């Protein structure tokens, strides 16, 4: 593929573009759109070819409408292979992707998902109980802890006890080490001993994998009667030929749900707090609305302002900047003729900052969603089309339960004036873990008393 076949983009050497992408992808995307318009080319770690980035909702619509045979999302996510395994839903394409997606979808059915609402709220209250008063601490770390505990219960089916503590510790260490963005570079993925970045990751990941495989084998040996977690469902699942998922397939899908459901949700919650806490008027309105739900998860899930707040947090600072595909045949996308092997991506960040869609795009304004119902290609934090994240509803539901539990209980302020995005593996998190200071904390109270203390 020659350069003339692609839209214009930065002329910087590929190594410099790669460094820029790893250091500050938001700046790169914003500057490229400003200079080159709604379509430009950049060079990223994977795929190997330049990536054509589309910044218009129309472009995203065309990408999401392409068939799985024409456009491979798994190939576009190849950078995640060393972390998730070759059986990960994020890395599969074609019939095998459809097979595993069908087998996993029932685990995220609405009624099953809502059964975890009370546990999500209890875990949040437990975390808030441990928050210090009058001292700055990184709230992102607390959100990670909550999200990990939710994953352990809802996905892995592990209850409190020594086994949960061991697994939680191993998974948390693995996620922390894997957060180093340099590990995404193939040149770094060499085991040079336990002190090397990749060597350290491999050893930490091996411990987490061993414990996770123990849980899978225990589930197979003891049966899944009475369990409603995702692991139990995957152990029971059969495809159209009555074939179950193998241990390797289950392991890789569990790792995928851990990474996708833990890190992204925790980060989205931290970003939400970044904008909610300084806005006293919004915080008061949210507390009043939350109090009206009387602590009932089903009612909390339907709160309009809370829903808009979650959507606005995911709009203003999406956890992932791009969602891409790799073409398996020549195609015309957004008026651009692209050859086989071209990588094309919709820029979540640029589309979400488009003034024609979102007036005052830099403003955190949850009320915009009370009247504006974006099309599936206009609000895309979870991607779109056949490859839209199967855990999207679970993630937004969890965000609502966590926010509804902590916002009425604490008065807090940001401990820093400036908060920017920093890269943590493939996600963009608040700088310094979003330090906050809790100035007042109320005990957990019956829901019908929350209104009096809002």
Image (cartoon, rainbow, N blue to C red):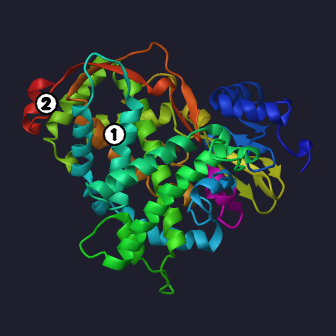
| Residue at 68%, 55% in the rendered image | 78
Asked whether 68 falls inside the magenta stretch, the response is yes
Q: Is residue 28 left or right of residue 376?
A: right
User: What SS does tag 2 mark?
Assistant: loop
Task: Please state, as top left, top right, bottom left or bottom right, where the C terminus lies in the image.
Answer: top left
Position above or below: 237 against 308: below
| Residue at 74%, 48% in the rendered image | 186
Question: Which sits in the foreground, 149 or 40?
Answer: 149
Q: Is residue 309 left or right of residue 195?
A: left
State the image coordinates of residue 128 (x, y, percent, origin top left): 25, 33
Question: Which sits in the foreground, 396 or 235?
Answer: 235
Question: Which sits in the foreground, 365 or 90?
Answer: 90
| Residue at 49%, 24% in the rendered image | 432
The quadrant in which residue 35 appears is top right
Position above or below: 289 against 374: above
Q: Is residue 44 left or right of residue 166?
A: right
> Could you tell me how many numbered marks the image carries?
2
Local crowd at mark 1 within 10 Å, few (<14), some, or many (≥20)?
A: many
Q: Is residue 339 left or right of residue 401?
A: right
Using the numbered discs, state the Cα–Cα distance from disc 2 to disc 1 in whole angstroms: 25 Å
Position above or below: 110 against 308: below
Local crowd at mark 2 within 10 Å, few (<14), some, or many (≥20)?
A: few
Residue 9 in view (yes/no): no
Q: Residue 443: which numbered mark, if any?
A: 2
Asked whether 258 falls inside the magenta stretch, the response is no
Q: Which residue is mark 1?
A: 307
Magenta residues span: 59-75
Mark 2 or 1 closer to N-term?
1
């Amino acid at each position: 593929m020659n350069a003339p076949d692609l839209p214009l983009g930065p002329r910087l050497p590929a190594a410099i573009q790669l460094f820029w992408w790893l250091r500050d992808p938001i700046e790169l995307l914003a500057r490229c759109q400003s200079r080159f318009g709604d379509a430009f080319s950049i060079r990223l770690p994977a795929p190997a070819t330049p990536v054509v980035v589309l910044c218009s909702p129309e472009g995203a619509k065309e990408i999401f409408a392409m068939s799985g045979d024409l456009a491979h999302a798994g190939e576009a996510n190849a950078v995640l292979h060393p972390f998730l395994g070759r059986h990960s839903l994020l890395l599969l394409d074609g019939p095998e992707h459809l097979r595993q997606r069908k087998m996993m979808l029932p685990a995220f059915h609405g009624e099953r998902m809502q059964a975890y609402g009370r546990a999500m709220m209890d875990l949040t209250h437990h975390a808030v109980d441990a928050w210090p008063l009058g001292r700055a601490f990184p709230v992102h770390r607390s959100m990670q802890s909550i999200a990990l505990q939710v994953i352990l219960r809802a996905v892995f089916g592990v209850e409190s006890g020594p086994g949960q503590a061991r697994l939680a510790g191993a998974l948390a260490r693995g996620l922390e080490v894997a957060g180093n963005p340099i590990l995404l570079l193939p040149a770094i993925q060499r085991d040079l001993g336990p002190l090397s970045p990749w060597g350290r990751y491999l050893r930490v990941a091996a411990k987490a994998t061993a414990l996770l495989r123990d849980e899978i084998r225990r589930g197979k040996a003891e049966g899944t009667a009475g369990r409603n977690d995702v692991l139990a469902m995957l152990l029971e699942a059969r495809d159209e030929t009555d074939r179950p998922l193998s241990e390797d397939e289950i392991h890789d899908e569990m790792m995928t749900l851990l990474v996708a459901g833990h890190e992204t949700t925790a980060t989205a919650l931290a970003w939400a707090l970044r904008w909610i806490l300084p806005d006293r008027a919004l915080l008061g309105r949210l507390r009043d609305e939350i109090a009206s739900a009387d602590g009932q998860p089903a009612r909390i899930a339907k709160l309009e302002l809370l829903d808009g707040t979650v959507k606005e947090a995911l709009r203003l600072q999406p956890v992932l900047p791009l969602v891409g595909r790799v073409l398996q045949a020549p195609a015309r996308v957004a008026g651009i003729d692209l050859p086989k092997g071209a990588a094309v991506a919709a820029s979540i960040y640029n589309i979400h900052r488009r003034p024609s869609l979102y007036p005052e795009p830099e403003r955190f304004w949850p009320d915009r969603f009370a009247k504006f119902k974006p099309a599936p290609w206009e609000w895309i934090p979870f991607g779109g089309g056949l490859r839209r994240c199967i855990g999207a509803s679970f993630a937004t539901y969890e965000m609502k339960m966590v926010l509804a539990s902590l916002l009425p209980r604490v008065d807090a302020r940001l401990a820093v004036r400036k908060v920017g995005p920093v890269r943590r593996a493939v996600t963009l998190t608040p700088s310094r873990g979003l330090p906050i200071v809790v100035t007042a904390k109320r005990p957990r109270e019956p829901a019908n008393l929350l209104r009096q203390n809002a």
